[in-house]
Image (cartoon, rainbow, N blue to C red):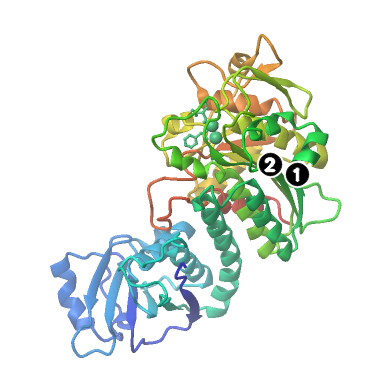
Amino acid sequence: MNSRPSIAFAKPATPKKGSVFVLSADGSGLSDAAKACDPAKALDRAFPVADFTAKFASVMEVLAPEGTSIDRLVVIGAGKVSALDDYAWMKLGGTIAASLRKAIDVAVVVDLADASVGGKEAANLAAGILLRSYSFDKYKTKKDNGDDKGETKKSAKITIYTNDPAGAKKAFADEVAVIDGVLLARDLVNEPANTLGPVEFAARAKELEALGVKVEILTEKEMEKLGMGSLLGVAQGSPRGARMAVMQWNGGKAKDSPVAFVGKGVTFDTGGNSMKPASGMEDMKGDMGGAAAVTGLMQALASRKAKANVVGIIGLVENAVDGHAQRPGDIVTSMSGQTIEVLNTDAEGRLVLADALWYCNDRFQPKFMVNLATLTGAIMVALGQHYAGLFSNNDELSERLTAAGQATQERLWRMPLGSEYDKLIDSKNADMKNIGGRYGGAIIAAQFLQRFVKDTPWAHLDIAGTAMGAPGNEINQSWGSGFGVRLLDRLVRDNYEQ
Ligand code: BES
Ligand code: MN
Ligand code: ZN
């Protein structure tokens, strides 16, 4: 299992044993507080040799300095202290986690001249440590060093020194709720499709009831009654069934209309009859990254008892091929009544979302809907893997999302919508077709979704590039990143809580 560090906060003290991490500001050298950690003399000599100037997130390590009781001193550069925002503190936490190795006893001394380390800063450090420490190793029967796993890996016990331990503890409790939401999303994305199909995913969503979330699971029969021919058409080539999970967290005022999040949950995407090439197809176990983010978000909001009414809806199917699978050219009728000519069975995510969005809007009349989906390869061509695509019919919602993206560094870049693009999905044989021409594939997918949201403020986040396989960073080394959970928690926290 993941060796999750345990974290405590305490008033500044002089650590006497174990590994000591000292955060040091750019150009300031070591203060008396750090020198009290004993090996200061060794450091005074090591700094120039190592050419260490405490640049942000740089690391200098001194092992068991002679004449000291501690095992190791690791100095982490904090750069310019005045420039440290929430995310920078998280990154520093991640940098600490990256250097933990097998340490059990760990003390973090924040030695930043005039910046007193308050509760919020310490909590962000802790958050970065936990996010970076995650790894998906549940299927490894041997540890990386070849040891038998039976001998459980001990996890680090970390004490962070802060002037405000009580404040840190309080801030950290909220952060842990969000972190656990991120880790749940990562777990779901990393889990292979043989163990996580629509039915198994729905069961994971159902577990949120323990936190006070109301969870309904719609079966194929119920979805058929509702007329969800678009979603069910995708599922019909798989023996794994189809589900829709409807999650409600009612932490706000009774009469207040909810905000809504909708996720694409294709537990595996073979492409169907329009089959994908073999190379890289394994990545399509992550084609439920949108649903994973929505589920992780609902867990986070419920765990921290967010003062908002929130709906989370995920459409769960497997896009597989057997003799029952839908064919190119098939025409299906969506819950909205609009008919769709399925010209490419690999453009399935939009077919799932069409019914999920319509159902969400129809039943809940939400203040807004934000959907998340690993929807198109084209968004990766446009933006690479550092920004998710944002498409929206509403400027205020877009601006709030973009701001939340900046704050959490789960960044969004707004892309265009317009009637010139919309007409590209008009069809000769039905109300619309599920693909357009050669260009603007991510936009065309968004135009398709827009036909199912009426005038409700809506945003579509295309997270194909960011939810999985994105380059690692200070706070994530996992293939499944959990992208979207911190972003949307922040959106709710900053704008929709009373
Ligand atoms: N799930 C894929 C999109 C995807 C590709 C996500 C790579 C993550 C990584 C989606 O269902 C898909 O197949 N989209 C097609 C659409 C096309 C057929 C119009 C695509 O992007 O090629
Ligand atoms: Mn596909
Ligand atoms: Zn897909």
Residue reaching furthest top?
428
Identity of the amino acid at label 1?
Answer: Thr
- Residue 137 lies, in percent from the top left, at 43, 61
Q: Count how many numbered circles sit on residues in the image.
A: 2
Q: Which residue is mark 2?
A: 242
Q: CA distance from mark 2 to mark 1?
A: 7 Å
- Residue 33 lies, in percent from the top left, at 34, 82
In the image shown, does 66 or 494 lie closer to the viewer? 66
Identity of the amino acid at label 2?
Answer: Ala
- Residue 337 lies, in percent from the top left, at 79, 24
Label 2 secondary element:
loop
Picture layout, residue 344 above or below residue 170: above
Contact between labelled residues 1 and 2, with CB atoms less than 8 Å apart: yes
Task: Give the crowd class for mark 1: few <14, some 14-19, many >=20 residues within 10 Å.
Answer: some
Task: Give the crowd class for mark 2: few <14, some 14-19, many >=20 residues within 10 Å.
Answer: many
Q: Residue at x 80, y 46 (%)?
A: 257
Q: Is mark 2 within 8 Å of ligand 3?
A: no
Q: Which residue is mark 1?
A: 219
